[in-house]
Image (cartoon, rainbow, N blue to C red):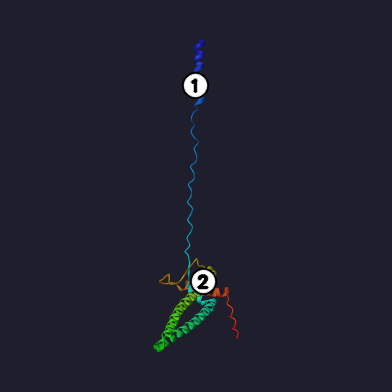
Amino acid sequence: MSRKSFLLLAAMLAMVVWGAAQNPPVQNPPVQNPPAATQAAAPAAIVPAKIAFVDIQQAIVACDEGKKESAVLQQFVEQMSQELQKRQKELEALKTNLEVSGSKLNDDARNDLIESIETKETALQRFQQDTQGDIDKRRSRLQNTIANKMLKSIEKVAKEKGANIVQFLGTAQIYGYVDPTLVITDDVVKAYNIAYPVTAAPAPKK
């Protein structure tokens, strides 16, 4: 082989080696194990809820504190009723006087009597409105105060009975039938009386 042929062959071999270095053979990528299928979490078991019922209005008036405060409110109502009757009688007396003696009075006296009647009528109407508003506020305050404290007794009895839900019986909700064994009103009243005992009211001073 001539020197020129040898050099040409060496150059060709060098180019082959350099190309192999620049483009290494592609190797098959390692086979990865497929991810294990995620197991679906088992759904939590749904336990049937036990429901209890409470007649909250009945419980408020049946507990000892409710009876005591209701008696105080009733006493106030009777006092206002007596005052109302007194004012009505005074007004009726003035009207009777106007009918009987109105024609015998001079103009000034008759006008004064008519003005007195109108003034008492306005005062009577205002007294009725104010008194009714006062009674409503006292009744609402009584019910709200006891109802808020009674929630603890309801929760206590419900836990003792194993109830998960407590619903209130009332006019807003109508039930075709409620099993009496699910009504815990009496138990709530007993628990409330124990939690909030009522002391006897002191005797009025003579």
The residue at which mark 1 appears reads as 16
x 49%, y 23%: residue: 19
Up/down of 43 relative to 54, above or below: above
Towards the viewer: 139 or 181: 139
- What is the quadrant of residue 201 in the picture? bottom right
Q: Amino acid at mark 1?
A: Val
Image coordinates of residue 188 in percent, x first then y, are: 52, 73
Q: Nearer the viewer, mark 2 or mark 1?
A: 2
Cα–Cα gap, marks 2 and 1: 99 Å
Label 1 crowd (10 A; few <14 / some 14-19 / many >=20): few
Up/down of 6 relative to 204, above or below: above
CB contact under 8 Å: marks 2 and 1: no
Q: What secondary structure is marked by label 2?
A: helix
Mark 2 or 1, nearer chain start:
1
Res 187 seen here: no
Q: Amino acid at mark 2?
A: Asn
Image coordinates of residue 189 in percent, x first then y, are: 53, 75
Label 2 crowd (10 A; few <14 / some 14-19 / many >=20): few
Image coordinates of residue 48 in percent, x first then y, are: 47, 64
Q: What secondary structure is marked by label 1?
A: helix
Q: Where does the C terminus fall, quadrant-wise?
A: bottom right
x 50%, y 15%: residue: 9
Residue 144 is marked as 2
